[in-house]
Amino acid sequence: MRGSIKLKVLLIGFFSFLFALLANRNSEGAVYAFEICTLRTSTMECIDGTNNFSTTQYYWDCVMYFGYIYDGEGTGSNGGGESNGGGDADDPGGGGEIIYPDLDKNNDKVLDCYQDLMRIANNSLVITSGFRTTERPNHDGIDIGSTPDRDACYGQIVFSVCEGVVKSIYFSDEGGWTVTFMDDNGNAWGICHLLNNPKSDSSVNLYEGKRVHPGITPVGQCDSTGSSCRGPHIHLSLKINGSYADPTGYVSGC
Amino acid sequence: MKNKFLAYALLIFIGSIGLINFSFSQHSGGEEILRCEIPQGFIYKSFYLSSSGMKGIIFLQHQPDRLYSDLSIFEVFDADNNMLLSKVLDSGWGFRGFTPDNKLILSKGQADYLSEIKIIDMQGKELISIPEVGSRRLVFDLYGRDLAVAAFDYDAAYLPSVVYDLASGKEKFRLGPVPLPKSNKNKEGNFYWTGTRIFLPIGKDNLFLWGIGATILLQKYDGPGYIWKINDIGGNISEGKLLNEEYLAVSYFVPERKYKEGLAIIRWRYGQIVFRMENYIVNNKREKNLPVLSVDMLHLDENNNLFFLQDDGRVHIFHFKKENKTWDENLMTTHEYRLGKTIAAGKGRPQVIKGTIYYAEEEDGQVVIRRIKLN
């Protein structure tokens, strides 16, 4: 009898320890270390008494790095859901379950229809310039704008194209305000020409590492902030294993 | 009754703290420094400024049914507003501003892909041409000696960062690609590794700054190891920027339950962190009344005052304390300036040079560049 109680206490203790360990891991995050080595060369002048010559030595120069790893899940209040339709209720706060519309029916972690990237009254979305066309062979993405009123796109909320996390938010001369995402398949998406800095834009409140859901999470507003284009639209790009791919292979017009 | 009195007293106390630490002022528009005609059949797109006071303005051919115009024109004016150059460029090519030593940058490409960049002098002579830049970004040192075509984030795992000597046009150094550590993948193949976020050539002594993960290093192109290393700046590096010959600004974040964003100012020669500000985001709200801690918006004036220029024209200033050579996050002043519809119309961001904000507006078929000197 006494042995059984001891076993129970031991089991409870063990599971409490395990729970504390897991809880601690979640709250503190995981810090990883890894080593990267760079192949370097060094040239040395040699004098052997009669000849002067130089020799090259190759060596590995290794440095240890550290980083915080985020697996895209379990960020609590920051990683929670957003309300449908552009609202931004990151944390339901226990106030009830949020029901998302199923905008990724084939479950490939990408929005099924690019029509759901923006919802503009009395307008639909159209690809205004395709991927690597004859006219623009270096256009490594697609441009999406509104029709019939091309200017109706301006200032409209753009929603995430994928299920994943925000990788970076930056301004470039060519792409204007740009947001990049890593989807849950490990592919990289980019949306360019956004109005304002999505980090300080109160209509989207974006930040790096934020969990995004296709067609649900607001990520910016439509504009043409790149320096070579005019007229509001967004540029959508996709990279798989480091190379550009046609986004319409994943997200169609429906 | 007593509780009510205490509540009022507390409110007055909190209010007075706010008055002491936070001042806010509104300002009207700035001083006009250039006014020029928009060429017939073209529209104004954006502007650039050089460190010597030159202004470059881009006009696109007016073709209302097209997103990309067939032609663009860029005009360059000197510090006294004399036109130095007016050049027509074919579709795909665009003027992208000035190098730190006042050369002209041209690029071919759209959105997040550049197929080529060229640097030319004022006579149109090509000094360097770099093909297949892709989505890598151009980073100049402070002096205009080195140009890095830098691969960040996802790209850094597939493409190298390459440094070119601008005088000779020759490649000087390359780093990477830096593959993502395999251990980052979880069972679902779901990972989030930030990778390279800082690659800054210094332009002296073959030095460069590299930031990867949460680690920052000062290294040499031709030397082993590193000169200094900060193992963990406090979170994943988001961006880095050299503010001047002394200070490097680094923004970082930790994507945890309480999302942390941070900014560190480092004396880059020594790897010494001299200032740090951190804020937390919970339910999309920042806990402290601080600007977005992004180095993109951060500038340093000639008196080493830090200021954040927001897209909406608000400027948050942290004054430099000479006695201990740092700043105080509790002593922030905020000013609001009218910068016109420069951002909203996608027509060029305001630019900041030596503590002065420059912005452009369209008025009656003309482009007007104005400046606001910050006190």
Image (cartoon, helix red, strand yellow):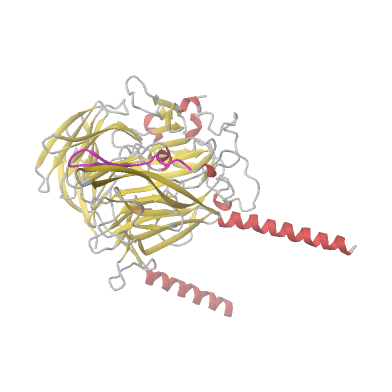
In the rendering, at what x and y percent does residue B269 appear?
Answer: 30, 60
- Foreground of the two, A189 or A145: A189
Q: Quadrant of residue A9?
A: bottom right
**Residue A207 appears in view:** no
In the rendering, at what x and y percent does residue B10 appear?
Answer: 50, 75
With B328 as the anchor, is B167 left or right in this view? left
Say which residue appears at 27% left-offset and 26% top-offset: B63
As for residue B167 lying within the magenta part, the answer is: yes
In the rendering, at what x and y percent does residue B4 appear?
Answer: 56, 76
Q: Quadrant of residue B89?
A: top left
**Residue B101 appears in view:** yes
What number of labels is visible? 0
As for residue B84 lying within the magenta part, the answer is: no
Residue at the farthest top position:
A134
Residue at the farthest bottom position:
B2
- Foreground of the two, B259 or B170: B170
| Range shown magenta | B164-180
In the rendering, at what x and y percent does residue B26 appear?
Answer: 30, 60
Question: Please, is residue A124 above or below residue B291 in the view?
Answer: above
Question: Please, is residue B333 above or below residue A238 in the view?
Answer: below
With A1 as the anchor, is A201 left or right in this view? left
Question: Please, is residue A174 above or below residue B279 in the view?
Answer: above
Q: In which quarter of the image is the N terminus of chain A?
A: bottom right
Residue at the farthest front position:
A49
Say which residue appears at 15% left-offset and 46% top-offset: B54
